[in-house]
Amino acid sequence: MHPIYNGVPADRLKVVWTKSSWSNPDGNCVEVAELPGGDIAVRNSRDPEGPALVYTPAEIRAFVRGAKTGEFDALID
């Protein structure tokens, strides 16, 4: 297994990727996967061989909480 780091080519990760049910038909979405050890990888669904970003569970929890409470709404308005 190759080392796992931010920017690792996503196709090197032997994981099951999950795409949001909110993804549009053009495939403009991110996909996530749990890594061995519990970290979470994120990739662009349009570039499945491109780089993956790797986050800890605490980082993902903080992001999801922020998204749910509207902290990032100004980015899309």
Image (cartoon, rainbow, N blue to C red):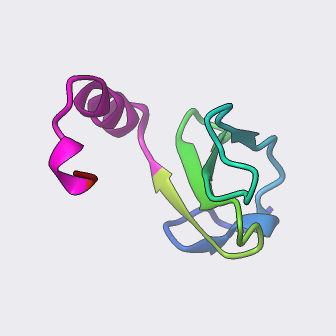
- Residue 24 in picture, x, y percent from top left: 67, 48
Against 22, residue 49 (above or below) is below
Against 74, residue 58 (above or below) is above
- Residue 37 in picture, x, y percent from top left: 60, 36
- Residue 39 in picture, x, y percent from top left: 53, 40
Instruction: Indicate the quadrant where residue 33 lies.
Output: top right
- Residue 10 in picture, x, y percent from top left: 71, 65
Instruction: Indicate the quadrant where residue 43 lies.
Output: bottom right
- Classify residue 19 as left or right of residue 12: left
Quarter of the figure that contains the N terminus: bottom right
The residue at the point 61 percent across, 35 percent down is 22
The residue at the point 84 percent across, 52 percent down is 14
Q: Is residue 70 magenta?
A: yes
Q: Depth check: 33 or 26 in front?
A: 26
Instruction: Indicate the quadrant where residue 27 lies.
Output: bottom right
* Most common secondary structure along the magenta stretch: helix
Against 54, residue 21 (above or below) is above
- Classify residue 46 as left or right of residue 44: right
Q: Is residue 13 magenta?
A: no
The residue at the point 75 percent across, 51 percent down is 25
- Classify residue 41 as left or right of residue 47: left
Q: Depth check: 5 or 76 in front?
A: 76
The residue at the point 31 percent across, 37 percent down is 63
Q: How many marks?
A: 0
What are the residue bounds of the magenta stretch?
55-75
